[in-house]
Amino acid sequence: MTSNTPLFRPEPPAATIADAYHAVRSRTRALAARLSPEDACVQSMPDASPAKWHLAHTTWFFERFILMARAPDYRVFNERFDYLFNSYYYTAGQMHARPRRGLVTRPSLAEVLDYRSHVDAGIQSLLEREKGNEELAFLVTLGINHEQQHQELLLTDIKHLFAQNPLLPAYAELSPAPSSEAAPLRWVAGKAGRVTVGHDGKDFAFDSEGPRHEVLLQEHALASRLVTNAEFREFIDDGGYAESALWLSDGWSTVLAEGWNRPLYWQEDLEQTFTLGGVMPIEPDAPVIHLSLFEADAFARWAGCRLPTEFEWEVAARDCPREGNWADSEAFRPRPASPGEGLRQVYGDAWEWTGSPYTPYPGFQPLTGSLGEYNGKFMCSQVVLRGGSCATPAGHVRPTYRNFFYPGQRWQFSGVRLARDGS
């Protein structure tokens, strides 16, 4: 189901927490509005979830952790939803198995949308009664940021789902990319020495972004822009996927087991790729996306470079405006880097794999109660990505924001920025 009507327009900053809540909730509905009930029900793989589940789970989050805990007069919409739409909060109760979410044809999409309206009314009433309550404002803000994460997941999961369809349908009608060349790759010296990293405690951040602490950075330089499709094509043409010496051991095992020989969604001709607008020509100067950590690392080694650490990236990103090609642009695919001095494409376009494991900072303390399960328990065997992507909502990402995925996952809009030692 496609339309020339934009999904949504960027909105000015919300005046109140209630405005912010309703803006994000409306945006999620708009993202799902292009889908049929059949589209919204199907799950393409265990790592992905149906769009209907995203719509319901984000609603469950507000109901379970805010309304059921703080609104004695709130009437639960459906007690069975507490089991169906819990994700991984075991301290909140048992949940339906993640790989089987696509088998839940009932409740219908219409009933899930009614569920959203019911919870929205409850949150609105609670916010009106408890104006100025800082704890409530934090919980709602946490829920808003949680829903923004699921807005991106909804897009990535729908893209993966549609790519399994032999008809390769489009989620939206995307305009042909404007003709432009990527800015030349230059090297930008990073800050070296003892630096302070992590969130400073002002404004909202997830618990995993702190506490603030010192680290030591060696002399290094970062590439001025992201690696392009054309550059990654050179890696392919040079036999990169066939050279075991370039790959981490687990990466090489994955290449052999999965038969990888190109990025996810690239067609066999290496000239076209599947996008949210259907099959489109590969833009040579646009950033390459849908790479696993293994592929990003192998490319960096082939190029005689390495991946940046998350702290090299964070310190450099502080001086960059938080502007970029976000989901709000409705391009839904990366664009070539614009000319200019300094680092480009720091925010938006593609999540940037780092060489840093997702581990707790010194003194890390998760949130209390069930919300402590949000981040902390995933700090094992995953790798940090930074910067956001063309599927990330504007305003969601900060210099300290830590995304994380397993090394072999590549259905997200993930790319690579090179780094090297020395200035």
Image (spheres, rainbow, N blue to C red):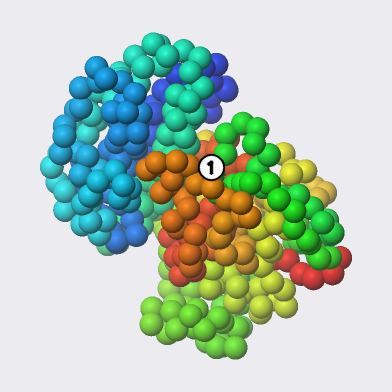
Instruction: Look at the image and tell me whether residue 291 can be seen.
Output: no
Instruction: Name above or below for residue 249 compared with residue 345.
Output: below
Evaluate whether residue 295 shows in this view: yes
Q: Secondary structure at mark 1?
A: loop
Say which residue label 1 marks: 206
* Residue drawn at the location 56% of the way across and 78% of the way down: 236
Nearer to us in this view, 369 or 393: 369
Which residue type does callout 1 highlight? Phe
Q: Quadrant of the C terminus?
A: bottom right
Location of residue 362 in the rendering, given as x and y in whole percent from the top left corner: 63, 55
Horizontal side of residue 208 vs 343, given as left or right: left
Q: Answer left or right for 420 relative to 7.
A: right
Q: Is residue 217 left or right of residue 257?
A: right
Q: Residues within 10 Å of mark 1 (few under 14, many from 20)?
A: some
Residue 292, percent from left and from top: 50, 67
**Residue 271: where, in percent of width, then height?**
50, 67
Q: Residue furthest left?
A: 106
The residue at the point 29 percent across, 61 percent down is: 45
Residue drawn where x is 23% and y is 29% of the image: 115
Label tally: 1
Identify the residue at horizontal 54%, vertical 44% (top origin).
207
The quarter of the rendered structure image containing the N terminus is top left
Q: Nearer the viewer, residue 265 or 92?
A: 92
Is residue 265 left or right of 201 when viewed as pictured? Answer: left
Position in image of residue 105 (x %, y %) = 14, 46
Instruction: Please determine whether, in this image, residue 26 is positioned above or below residue 127.
Output: below
Q: Quadrant of residue 187?
A: bottom right
